[in-house]
Image (cartoon, rainbow, N blue to C red):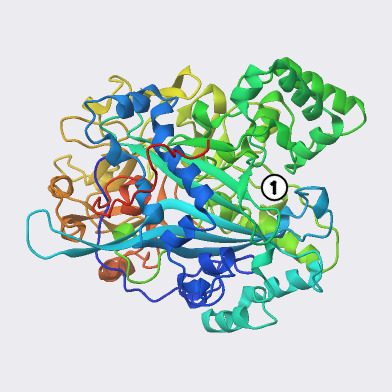
């Protein structure tokens, strides 16, 4: 993808701590920063035996306790792009002529560079996962999990390629590490009810009170001990193929997911299977193993758990690493890990047997529903469902980060829409009642929580997933009044699933094209545009007709259309399904807010290696889709921070508290490529030590 949305330095006041997720997550950057010097740095949790664990540098962390993890991640980063199932991406990385191929993959040196580290971006209460039993030794009241989520970041000085003084470059990277703790240790004096009660008290606190409470002995964090750390989970962008390479999708990115678990405190972390991630290649190679999986999965207990969304697939069928693909979500074949493992006839027969036993399937009502449910409980399916690129929790950025590179809303629409269910489970624990762990589809919250989300767009509002077909599993996937269901990426892997967008007219942020995802082979997709009709590429893209109030007497309009595919003539493209914007900031409609977009010359500035802060000045005003927690962006888009210098304009337009929606790969921190390459190249791997597979 080419071009970035850019802006000035954010100096807005930190938001109030009370948010939709208050009571089940700590997400405010100011609050998290106050905890960082305390007990919850990555080093303090993973290497507590160190003399000063808070000060453990990133290089020491990965050369110490996490050395085995480092070797595996480095091997994956180096080898997996060459093995991509996508032929365009694979050829790009294997072609000798592709001089910039290495620059497009994740820079493995960052893992052990002294100038990189981990920012704490969120603490999430996952008591809703208390139904899982990790192994026979842990059959006690675990109370679920507490997750500490970190983003890899760097802060360096680099030389100006044109000469002159050095300049500072600091950014987060598309790399998350989650340290997962058991919410309650085996011999803890605390009960699940007490832990839940502590979390619920945080819901109504402002920043100052919340920080004081989190640091207190009676708060929900201070009882936690590094001995409760069970595993670490990694999700990173392996590579990003730009729009000039993957021209039809307007760019492409693949994400690696890995889990490492330890059996005892201070023990080495070992490879652990990914949760409910079927090892598709191994199952296809081994008919006996696949037959055993079918026998287990089609049994009444497993079918009931899958229907409720709490299935726990045995480890012998699972993969130890997974790769998800963006953009396109569930329409992409590589995100459908159950593809070709089961026939519709087999699924239908299993459903009939289940119902003949006198039981009722509440969520799964068709083979398509079964497939979607099985895919979305996997790592690949989950991380490409109503998500931000390949992440559900990138975290919000603190004050002082340039708006062009600052995340405004910390989590995806899926994360936010699941908050009512999670809060209900925590409340049940607090009341010493048996929680209902069941959930709706990942893309669509259970209808029993619709009332909790009625004042948001998260359930059936703009940008919400919908279904335009007649499949009974998705009969309630409708859009609210004034919206229509539009299928943007038609695919056999996600048939009839669309997005709720404006009906009978067009609005800012609406998609402007539709197309088909054609699967040449599993994991090898191409996109064919079907609307606007005509050229399959955007070379002759026709802008939509603007309404009368946006058109002057000469027929000119300030509407602009950003397109998906790469257009060679002006080196642009990369907005999934296209996006409508306004070319200025006067008289904006309610759904829009004033932001900044890259102007002519920005791409040349970046390509020339000029300081990024210098290129940020090459901007122009634009009316973009406004966003906040209650009004999230479409899938494959991210909500970036509002602009302080544009507040007067946005106050006039009544959207002063809103962020702006853009593709995530237009942000510096969501690209594996484009970052400084001047890091000292340590000998992280010898020629003979390529790391375990």
Q: Quadrant of the N terminus?
A: top left
Dot 1: within a 10 Å radius of its alpha carbon, few (fewer than 14), some, or many (20 or more) residues?
some
Identify which residue is drawn at 45% across, 32% down: 488
**Relative vertical location of residue 610 with respect to residue 245 in this rendering, above or below:** below
Residue 342 coordinates in the image, percent (x, y): 69, 20
Q: Is residue 672 above or below residue 631?
A: above
How many numbered marks does the figure carry? 1
Eyeballing the image, is 523 above or below 454? above
Q: Residue 230, image x and y in percent? A: 67, 56
Residue 251 falls in image quadrant:
top left
Left or right of 89 on screen, residue 40: right
Residue at 66% across, 26% down: 368
Point 36% across, 53% down: residue: 110
Query: x%, y% of residue 530?
Result: 38, 22
- The quarter holding residue 320 reads top right
Furthest residue toward front: 688
């Amino acid at each position: 993808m080419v071009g970035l949305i850019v802006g000035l330095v954010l100096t807005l006041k930190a938001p109030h701590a009370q948010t939709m997720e208050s009571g089940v997550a700590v997400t405010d950057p100011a609050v998290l920063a106050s905890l960082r010097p305390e007990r919850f740095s990555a080093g303090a949790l993973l290497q507590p035996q160190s003399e000063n664990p808070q000060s453990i540098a990133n290089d020491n962390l990965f050369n110490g306790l996490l050395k085995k993890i480092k070797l595996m991640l480095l091997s994956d980063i180096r080898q997996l792009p060459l093995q991509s199932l996508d032929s365009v991406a694979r050829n790009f990385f294997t072609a000798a002529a592709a001089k910039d191929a290495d620059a497009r993959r994740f820079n493995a040196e960052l893992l052990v560079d002294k100038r990189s580290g981990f920012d704490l971006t969120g603490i999430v209460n996952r008591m809703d996962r208390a139904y899982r039993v990790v192994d026979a030794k842990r059959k006690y009241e675990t109370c679920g999990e507490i997750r500490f989520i970190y983003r890899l970041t760097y802060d360096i000085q680099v030389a100006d390629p044109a000469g002159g003084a050095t300049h500072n470059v600091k950014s987060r990277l598309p790399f998350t590490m989650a340290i997962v703790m058991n919410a309650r240790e085996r011999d803890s004096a605390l009960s699940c009810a007490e832990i839940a009660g502590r979390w619920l008290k945080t819901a109504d606190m402002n920043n100052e009170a919340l920080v004081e409470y989190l640091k207190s002995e009676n708060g929900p964090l201070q009882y936690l001990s590094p001995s409760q750390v069970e595993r670490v989970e990694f999700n990173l962008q392996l590579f990003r193929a730009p729009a000039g390479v993957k021209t039809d999708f307007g760019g492409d990115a693949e994400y690696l997911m890995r889990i490492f678990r330890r059996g005892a405190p201070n023990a080495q972390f070992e490879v652990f299977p990914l949760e409910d991630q079927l090892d598709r290649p191994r199952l296809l190679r081994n008919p006996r193993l696949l037959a055993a999986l079918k026998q287990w999965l089609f049994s009444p207990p497993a079918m009931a758990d899958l229907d409720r969304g709490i299935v726990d697939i045995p480890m012998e069928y699972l993969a130890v690493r997974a790769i998800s693909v963006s953009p396109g979500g569930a329409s992409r074949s590589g995100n459908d890990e159950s593809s070709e493992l089961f026939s519709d006839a087999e699924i239908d027969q299993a459903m009939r047997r289940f119902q003949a036993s006198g039981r009722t399937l509440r969520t799964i009502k068709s083979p398509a529903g079964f497939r979607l449910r099985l895919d979305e409980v996997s790592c690949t399916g989950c991380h490409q469902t109503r998500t931000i690129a390949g992440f559900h929790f990138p975290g919000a950025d603190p004050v002082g980060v340039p708006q062009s590179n600052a995340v405004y809303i910390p989590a995806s629409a899926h994360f936010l829409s699941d908050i009512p269910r999670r809060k209900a489970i925590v409340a049940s624990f607090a009341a010493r009642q048996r929680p209902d762990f069941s959930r709706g589809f990942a893309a669509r919250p259970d209808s029993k929580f619709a009332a909790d989300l009625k004042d948001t767009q998260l359930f059936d509002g703009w940008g919400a997933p919908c279904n335009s077909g007649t499949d009974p599993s998705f009969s309630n996937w409708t859009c609210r009044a004034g919206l229509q269901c539009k299928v943007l990426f038609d695919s056999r892997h996600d048939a009839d699933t669309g997005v709720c967008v404006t009906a009978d007219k067009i609005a800012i942020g609406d998609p402007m094209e539709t197309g088909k995802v054609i699967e040449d082979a599993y994991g090898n997709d191409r996109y064919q545009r079907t609307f606007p009709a005509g050229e399959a590429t955007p070379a002759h893209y026709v802008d939509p007709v603007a309404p009368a109030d946006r058109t002057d007497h000469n027929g000119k309009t300030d509407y602009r259309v950003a397109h998906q595919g790469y257009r060679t003539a002006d080196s642009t493209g990369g907005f999934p399904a296209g996006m409508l914007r306004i070319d200025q900031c006067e008289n904006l409609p309610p759904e829009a807010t004033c932001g900044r977009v890259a102007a002519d010359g920005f791409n040349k500035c970046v390509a020339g290696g000029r300081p990024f802060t210098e290129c940020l000045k090459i901007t122009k005003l634009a009316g973009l889709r406004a966003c906040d927690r209650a009004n999230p962006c479409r899938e494959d888009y991210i909500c970036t921070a509002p602009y302080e210098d544009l507040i007067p304009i946005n106050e006039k337009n009544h959207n002063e508290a809103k962020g702006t929606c853009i593709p995530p790969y237009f942000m510096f921190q969501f690209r594996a490529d484009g970052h400084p390459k001047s890091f000292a190249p340590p000998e992280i791997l010898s020629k003979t030590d390529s790391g375990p597979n």
